Image: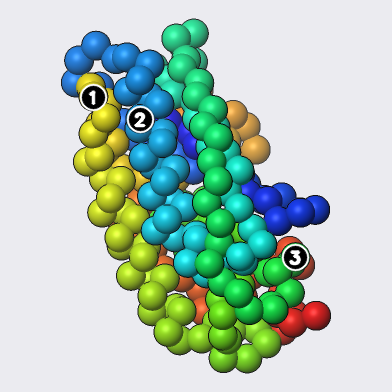
Amino acid sequence: MRLAVDFESPPCVGTNVLHFQCHETGGLGSSDVLNMATALGGYWINDLWKTYASHDATSLEINSTYALIEGQPNVKRVRIVDAVAGLATSDTEWGQVSGLINWDSGDPRRGGKPRNYLPFFKGDGNSDSGNWASAIVTAMNTACGTFLGHVQGHTAGSLVCDNFVDYSTVLHGAYRLNGAVFPIPSGSFNPHAGTQRRRVGRLFG
């Protein structure tokens, strides 16, 4: 299952693309896919994003694509309108700042460290202009474990989520015949602020 979770803080937008490995235990209904996508997207937003996201930012929608067999025509798509606001109220320069999670996996392309940037991350208090406060780092590391605990084994009807995964369709510049899946058992929040320029020291305007 592929989820694209969209956020906005006008005039800016941001998206997190996520992949989950699932299996079916019986006849699959469309409601199973809808309920699974709603739950997984909700865990991402509520466990990892909203606490330290800008109060000016809102989750817009969750777009899901699910296929039992890769490349087969029986693909189910779901679009879920969403509206969760961030809770952080500080005046950090949100337009270019993001939180960065490094996930652990066996993916050799990225040194086993696929990543996600959390858009419109503010934090409400930072140790300096390029680093998050230690309390935020500690809380987000806990949140990573909470998120993984929520999604692993989550069941919606006949659909079961096995793992949050790193999913690869390209190897050495060429498309794979079949995508490679690397389960993600843990993750850690980067203490350095992520930015669009991939530099620290630019947290405040």
Q: Quadrant of the N terminus?
A: top left
Q: Secondary structure beneath disc 2?
A: helix
Disc 1 target residue: 157
| Vertical order, 197 against 171 (above or below) | below
How much space separates mark 2 and mark 3, taking CA atoms? 32 Å
Q: Secondary structure beneath disc 3?
A: loop
Q: Nearer the viewer, residue 8 or 164?
A: 8
Q: Residues within 10 Å of mark 2 (few under 14, many from 20)?
A: some
| Vertical order, 80 against 112 (above or below) | above
Q: Check contact, mark 3 vs mark 1: CB within 8 A.
A: no
First in sequence, mark 2 or 3: give its number.
2
| Vertical order, 182 against 86 (above or below) | above
Disc 2 target residue: 35
Residue type of the residue flagged with mark 3: Gly
* Residue at 73 percent of width and 74 percent of height: 93
**Residue 143, horizontal then vertical, whole percent:** 36, 65
Q: Residues within 10 Å of mark 3 (few under 14, many from 20)?
A: many
Residue type of the residue flagged with mark 1: Gly
**Residue 104, horizontal then vertical, whole percent:** 39, 59
Q: Check contact, mark 2 vs mark 1: CB within 8 A.
A: yes
First in sequence, mark 2 or 1: give its number.
2
* Residue at 41 percent of width and 36 percent of height: 38
Disc 3 target residue: 95
Q: Secondary structure beneath disc 1?
A: loop
**Residue 166, horizontal then vertical, whole percent:** 44, 45
Q: Quadrant of the C terminus?
A: bottom right
